[in-house]
């Protein structure tokens, strides 16, 4: 009989301690509510191709189009293209819950080709031919959103220099 009472007391003690632990953990737990990131919010996305700590941690901005059925988000980039994958919330950083007017303006253009460059290292300007436009303009390197275009220009230039 002593063993039965002892195990009952131990069982209730363990159960009460477990309940207290769960309540303490729930106080610090972040819950993701369905309206945590409303449609139209501006977010940045964790750069998964980052190779060292000196590169930017986030890329973007992106606009939330909708929340998918599985809790991930569908994003639209500055050019209006839908991102080809759904993104979980742990890879997003909120910039603004309201749509920013600077992102909504249609001031993003597509580079057709970079023809030349001028300036010093770190402050280059590039002579850019734009898709859909005849005139070429000089643009700062910091104003170019797609680093791949600049990389492609330098690879082609270095290839031509070796010939």
Image: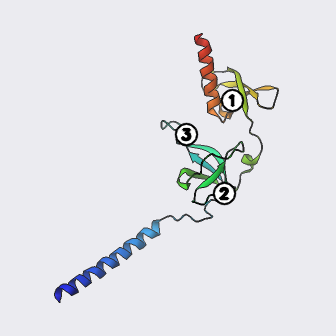
Mark 3: few/some/many CA within 10 Å (<14, 14-19, 20+): few
Give 42 or 131, whichever is nearer the viewer: 131
The answer for how far apart the CA atoms under marks 2 and 1 are is 34 Å
Total numbered labels placed on residues in the image: 3
Residue at image coords 25%, 80%: 10
The mark that comes first in sequence, 3 or 2, is 3
As drawn, the residue found furthest toward the bottom would be: 1
List x then y, in percent, for residue 162: 58, 11
List x then y, in percent, for residue 37: 62, 59
As drawn, the residue found furthest toward the top would be: 163
The mark that comes first in sequence, 1 or 3, is 3
The answer for how far apart the CA atoms under marks 1 and 3 are is 18 Å
Residue designated by label 1: 140
Q: Nearer the viewer, mark 3 or mark 2?
A: 2
Give 132 or 118, whichever is nearer the viewer: 132
Residue designated by label 3: 56
Residue at image coords 67%, 45%: 77
The mark that comes first in sequence, 2 or 1, is 2
Residue at image coords 76%, 30%: 130
Mark 1: few/some/many CA within 10 Å (<14, 14-19, 20+): some
């Amino acid at each position: 009989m002593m063993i039965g009472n002892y195990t009952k007391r131990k069982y209730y003690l363990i159960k009460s301690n477990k309940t207290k632990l769960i309540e303490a953990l729930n106080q610090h737990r972040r819950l993701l509510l369905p309206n945590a990131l409303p449609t139209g919010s501006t977010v940045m996305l964790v750069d998964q191709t980052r190779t060292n700590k000196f590169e930017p941690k986030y890329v973007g901005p992106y606009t939330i189009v909708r929340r998918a059925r599985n809790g991930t988000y569908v994003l639209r980039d500055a050019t209006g293209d839908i991102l080809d994958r759904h993104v979980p919330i742990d890879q997003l950083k909120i910039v603004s819950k309201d749509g920013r007017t600077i992102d909504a303006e249609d001031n993003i253009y597509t580079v057709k080709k970079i023809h030349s460059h001028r300036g010093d290292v770190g402050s280059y300007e590039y002579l850019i031919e734009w898709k859909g436009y005849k005139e070429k303009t000089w643009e700062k390197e910091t104003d170019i959103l797609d680093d791949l275009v600049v990389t492609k220009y330098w690879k082609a230039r270095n290839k031509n220099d070796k010939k």
